[in-house]
Structures are given as C-alpha cells and as structure tokens.
Image (cartoon, grey):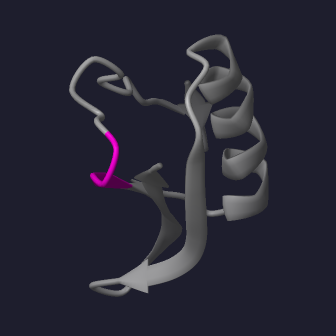
Amino acid sequence: MWSDRIRFSIPWDEFSPGTSIFIPSMNPRITLSRFREEAELHNAHFTFRFVVEDGVQGLRVWRT
C-alpha cells in the first residue's frame, strides 16, 4: 500500500482481530481510501481513527 510516496506493507497474516497499526500520513483521508482498497482485497474488516501520535499525524486502524 502506498501513502505519501511511502510503501507500507501490511502484515495481514499477523493483523488479527483486536490488534491495531498506526500509519503516519500527511493526508490521512487519502491513506484511509488506499487502506480500504487493500483491506477489501484481503476481506478484512476494520475500524479507524484519525490521530496524532507523538506529534505525527496519521491513521490508527484496528482489525475487527
């Protein structure tokens, strides 16, 4: 998955329900759109929040 010209590899096999990942992003709405596309390919359900963690803007995604 690409976000802000950076390639992120989502470890779908390890991304089990109840776990979360943080994806830093300058434009979290675009990142969310790309994440949704990839999640759909893996038949994964998730919930998300736009967050700032340690001064870094991004997207926190939980697998449901």
- Position of 41 compared to 51: left or right? right
- Position of 62 compared to 29: left or right? left
Q: Is residue 27 visible?
A: no
Magenta residues: mostly which secondary structure? loop
Residue at horizontal 45 percent and vertical 59 percent from the top? 24
- Position of 41 compared to 59: left or right? right
Residue at horizontal 33 percent and vertical 52 percent from the top? 21
The quadrant in which residue 43 appears is top right
Which residue is more in the foreground, 30 or 38? 38
Above or below, 18 against 11 in this view is below
Q: Is residue 39 visible?
A: yes
Coordinates of residue 15 in the picture (x, y in percent):
30, 34
Residue at horizontal 27 percent and vertical 85 percent from the top? 54
Coordinates of residue 48 in the picture (x, y in percent):
58, 63
**Quadrant into which the N terminus falls:** top right
Residue 56 part of the magenta-drawn span: no
Which residue is more in the foreground, 59 or 16? 16
Above or below, 17 against 11 in this view is below
Q: How many numbered dots are placed on residues in this image?
A: 0
Coordinates of residue 64 in the picture (x, y in percent):
47, 49
Coordinates of residue 9 in the picture (x, y in percent):
37, 23
Above or below, 2 against 45 in this view is above
Q: Quick one: which residue is furthest to the left in this view?
A: 14
**Which stretch is magenta?**
17-21
Residue at horizontal 29 percent and vertical 24 percent from the top? 11
